[in-house]
Image: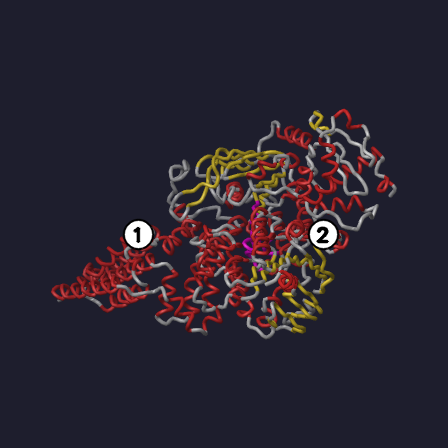
């Protein structure tokens, strides 16, 4: 094949959606309305849109589940890799399209990884089904998992197996439904790396449904925005798409923090071509010329203005020591600078120390070891001699990668697991001497999977369960109040399982609150939530704060850590490797790296710019620049506004 | 690992936790890849098992039953079954024997009647031990393929393997739902005579916890069904070539024949010897 032909081949349209409308049987409105969409061979596309904009429905049109399996009202035509989907069977189409579901665990139907991979090629009667399975293993570099049982795998490994199983038919197109939502950040990155590999090395066309724009910025080439009611609003290259900050925010999609920061600072000037950096690398690249320029400048000269661009530089203040200054600028038109950052670290740490002094801890964990029994009957510990004291008024975030022991620690405190050695004391009660029922008078534990908490017919009954079991009378006003606080009044007669993800989380919080606990334990409360529901949860946490003495949250959500926690405990392989404040925790990149944690993008940007104290939120970052503006009066463009 | 083994000895009650049951079930299903019985073709095992599961019902000769029992006991021992399974078996047998003794004494049959009734216990013992020996030696995959090859419908044989695949997930979920009840419920204040109130409470919980479990399972099945469609499961059911391809690894070897022949010889010998004891 000559290069020109190849180029043409690469540029050809692999997916052609023409005037497609679809309505699920029995639904009142269309899930897709007159969708027109072309996707080029070799593209890496993100489909974004708010809840109910038909993202999954669109993808199910591409693999033929619609219209063959779901027989709703379908109009239009979908051509995938030259095949008209209405003319082909689902099985036939799966040779062209791989699909990884959002709840990918339920997609795995065989006991071992290799069986799972060989299942589809075998079903299609390929003589070489074993070779195909091996090839898929090889393609994703996961040979070491070949003989493992599915139930031994971590979430990320399961996701990879689901992907590899779909790859065993060697399709040209891969669709992945919300990979980041269900995985911890380190595994999500791994999956994206694999997808990038398939895209670059094997020329596969990748389509992801994604809420997390940081991942889109890092990996995707173009973005399709779906509107409510299943209409395509636009298809744009990634940078242009994510720079449409106002439009995305309006649709409850949060652009990357870097982009938000740049957009906020540019809001008044409207300069340039409307493109902002979307990745940390791009942001740093824009700032790099100045940083490099500043690098060898003596400290004494920092207040002098040698630059024809009229930039001024201030030394940073941190713990009383003067550190090297790093000026930052935003683009070629205007220059902004970071102002001295106020390390909130010391302040809050001091406050914590004061509040702890002379007080009894609510939770006292002494040299506690606990774990699980492996299939070889070995007792393998997930917690190794943990010492920990939790005091009233603390908002604790437990962070660490999967298997670090976060959940086990929460279970020890809730009393549903007893320490093998050592002791756990909760509000003066030794957990080994009381039943979980007795302990539940002071502790409420919110499970990671909300569905495991819905034990009554409707959520009102779920919320009342605790009080009814204790035969408390006149609970009506209290229950009403709880329902209102958590916006559940309308939903109170619904079965918890049938609610949306965000509603389910709210319901579980309400269940916990109705127990009037002293201590509240939450396991991954913001996992698999979209941005709106996430924000809502964070607000509700503030609500909890007034009623609960201490909250302990196990989470992968670093944004939650930055926004909400006062104390952060980093766990790694069953031990506590750091116990500090949320402002301080991100100052230890090596440690976070060890625990496979990824700080929020704005923190990473602060690190990349070598700021002495990282900004924890976009607002903090922007404020630092704004304050600097006012002080120096050098940013005329923005200052005029 | 310094923590392994030495740190913790599970107490008696911990052995009966749901988690422990999960581990034991998984061991029974998947743990034994190399036992004496696991070497044979699944179809041979199914044939062998059918004999030991059906024939004892029609034998009334205690000597013959004892002979069969000896054989299955040795094989059960060789398949290193889970202690938990054996405990359950022991509880069943003891209560069965005790009940027979009580019944025969109450109705004036005396020990003679109990002796006669013990034939039934013996039959049950042979059948259960045979089941334990076979099923802890044969992983669900081989069982499923064996069933498929002797003509069981594809859905059924797939269901066997899929059931085992889902088992750990379901047990885990069941355990958490159980804790949901416990963390919000209230155990009885007074334990009652011999803790009967606690027993009733625990029993009640363990039953009601199935209800949410079933609803959750129903919900997750949707994805599974779609995935099966995509993976060509329905497509394969109408293609005899696939079945052939899938089962091509199953081969009846010489050792399978030898095993069957030896079993037949042994059984014949037992019947012959048994005939001298029969009245």
Is A609 placed above or below A108 here? above
Is A439 placed above or below A349 here? below
For disc 1, the marked residue is B80
Residue extending farthest front: A2
Judging from the image, the colouring scheme is secondary structure
For disc 2, the marked residue is A239
Q: Is any atom of residue A399 visible in this view? A: yes
Q: Is residue A141 magenta?
A: no
Q: Is residue A449 magenta?
A: yes
- The magenta-colored residue range is A444-463
Residue A288 placement (x, y as % from top left) = 72, 39
Residue extending farthest left: B276
Residue A260 placement (x, y as % from top left) = 74, 47
Instruction: State the image quarter where residue B258 is shown.
Output: bottom left
B242 left or right of A207 in image: left
Residue A322 placement (x, y as % from top left) = 71, 26
Q: Nearer the viewer, residue A215 or A550?
A: A215
How dense is the environment of label 2, judged by Cα within 10 Å: few (below 14), some, or many (20 and up)? many
How dense is the environment of label 1, judged by Cα within 10 Å: few (below 14), some, or many (20 and up)? some
Which quadrant of the rendered structure holds the N terminus of chain A?
bottom right
Q: Tell me the chain of label 2.
A: A
Residue A351 placement (x, y as % from top left) = 67, 30
Is A349 placed above or below B178 here? above
Is the same chain shared between marks 2 and 1? Answer: no
């Amino acid at each position: 094949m000559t290069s020109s032909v190849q180029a043409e081949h690469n540029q050809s349209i692999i997916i052609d959606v023409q005037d497609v409308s679809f309505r699920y049987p029995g639904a009142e409105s269309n899930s897709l309305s007159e969708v027109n969409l072309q996707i080029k061979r070799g593209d890496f596309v993100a489909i974004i849109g708010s809840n109910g904009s038909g993202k999954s429905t669109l993808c199910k049109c591409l693999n033929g589940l619609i219209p063959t399996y779901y027989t709703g009202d379908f109009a239009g035509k979908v051509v995938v890799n030259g095949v008209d989907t209405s003319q082909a069977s689902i099985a036939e189409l799966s040779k062209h399209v791989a699909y990884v579901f959002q709840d990918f665990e339920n997609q795995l139907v065989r006991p071992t990884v290799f069986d799972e991979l060989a299942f589809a090629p075998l079903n299609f009667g390929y003589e070489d089904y074993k070779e195909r399975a091996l090839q898929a293993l090889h393609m994703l570099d996961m040979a070491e998992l070949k003989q493992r049982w599915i139930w031994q795998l971590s979430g990320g490994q399961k996701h990879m197996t689901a992907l590899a199983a779909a790859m065993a038919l060697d399709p040209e197109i891969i669709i992945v439904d919300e990979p980041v939502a269900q995985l911890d950040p380190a595994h999500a990155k791994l999956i994206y790396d694999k997808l990038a590999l398939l895209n670059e090395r094997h020329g596969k066309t990748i389509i992801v449904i994604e809420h997390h724009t940081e991942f889109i910025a890092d990996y995707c080439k173009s973005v399709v925005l779906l509107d409510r009611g299943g209409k395509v609003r636009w298809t744009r290259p990634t940078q242009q798409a994510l720079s449409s900050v106002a439009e995305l925010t309006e649709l409850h999609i949060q652009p990357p923090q870097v982009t938000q920061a740049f957009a906020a600072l540019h809001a008044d000037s409207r300069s340039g071509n409307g493109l902002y950096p979307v990745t940390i690398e791009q942001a740093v690249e824009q700032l790099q010329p100045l940083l490099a320029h500043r690098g060898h400048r003596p400290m004494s000269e920092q207040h002098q203005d040698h630059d024809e661009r009229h930039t001024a530089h201030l030394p940073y203040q941190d713990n009383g020591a003067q550190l090297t200054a790093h000026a930052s600028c935003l683009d070629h038109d205007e220059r902004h600078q970071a102002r001295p950052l106020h390390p909130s670290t010391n302040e809050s740490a001091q406050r914590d120390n004061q509040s702890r002094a002379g007080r009894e801890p609510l939770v006292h964990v002494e040299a506690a070891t606990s774990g699980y029994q492996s299939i070889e009957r070995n007792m393998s510990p997930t917690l190794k001699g943990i010492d920990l004291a939790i005091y009233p008024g603390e908002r604790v975030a437990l962070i660490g990668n999967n298997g670090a022991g976060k959940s086990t620690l929460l279970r020890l405190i809730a009393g549903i697991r007893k320490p093998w050695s050592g002791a756990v004391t909760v509000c003066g009660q030794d957990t080994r001497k009381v039943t979980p029922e007795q302990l539940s008078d002071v502790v409420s534990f919110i499970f990671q999977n909300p569905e495991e908490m819905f034990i009554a017919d409707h959520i009102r009954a779920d919320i009342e369960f605790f009080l009814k079991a204790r035969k408390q009378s006149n609970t009506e006003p209290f229950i009403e109040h709880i329902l209102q606080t958590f916006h559940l009044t309308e939903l109170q007669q619904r079965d918890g399982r049938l609610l949306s993800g965000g509603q389910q989380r709210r319901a579980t919080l309400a269940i916990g609150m109705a127990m009037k606990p002293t201590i509240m334990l939450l396991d991954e409360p913001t996992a698999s939530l979209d941005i709106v529901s996430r924000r809502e949860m964070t607000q509700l946490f503030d609500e909890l704060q007034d009623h609960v003495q201490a909250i302990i949250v196990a989470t992968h959500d670093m944004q939650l850590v930055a926004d909400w926690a006062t104390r952060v405990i980093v766990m790694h392989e069953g031990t506590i490797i750091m116990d500090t404040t949320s402002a301080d925790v991100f100052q230890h990149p090596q440690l976070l790296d060890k625990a496979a944690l990824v700080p929020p993008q704005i923190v990473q940007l602060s690190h990349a710019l070598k700021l002495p104290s990282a900004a924890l939120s976009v607002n903090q970052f922007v404020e630092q620049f704004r304050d600097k503006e006012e002080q120096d009066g050098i940013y005329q463009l923005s200052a005029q506004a | 690992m310094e923590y392994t083994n030495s740190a913790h000895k599970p107490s008696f009650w911990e052995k009966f936790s749901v988690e422990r049951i999960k581990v034991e079930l998984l061991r029974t299903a998947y743990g034994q890849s190399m036992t004496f019985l696991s070497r044979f073709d699944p179809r041979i095992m199914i044939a062998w098992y059918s004999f030991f599961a059906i024939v004892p019902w029609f034998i009334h000769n205690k000597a013959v039953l004892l002979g069969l029992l000896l054989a299955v006991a040795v094989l059960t021992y060789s398949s290193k079954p889970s202690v938990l399974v054996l405990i359950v078996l022991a509880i069943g047998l003891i209560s069965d024997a005790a009940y027979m003794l009580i019944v025969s004494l109450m109705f004036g049959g005396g020990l003679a009647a109990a002796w006669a009734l013990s034939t039934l216990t013996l039959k049950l013992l042979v059948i259960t031990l045979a089941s334990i020996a076979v099923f802890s030696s044969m992983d669900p995959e081989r069982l499923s393929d064996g069933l498929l090859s002797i003509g069981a419908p594809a859905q059924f044989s797939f269901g066997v393997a899929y059931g085992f695949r889902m088992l750990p997930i379901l047990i885990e979920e069941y355990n958490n739902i159980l804790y949901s009840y416990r963390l919000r419920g209230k155990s009885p204040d007074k334990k009652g005579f011999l803790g009967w109130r606690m027993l009733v409470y625990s029993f009640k919980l363990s039953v009601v916890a199935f209800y949410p479990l079933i609803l959750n399972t129903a919900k997750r099945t949707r994805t599974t069904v779609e995935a099966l469609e995509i993976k060509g499961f329905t497509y394969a059911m109408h293609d005899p070539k696939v079945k052939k391809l899938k089962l091509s690894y199953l081969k009846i070897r010489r050792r399978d024949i030898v095993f069957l022949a030896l079993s037949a010889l042994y059984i014949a010998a037992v019947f012959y010897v048994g005939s001298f004891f029969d009245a």
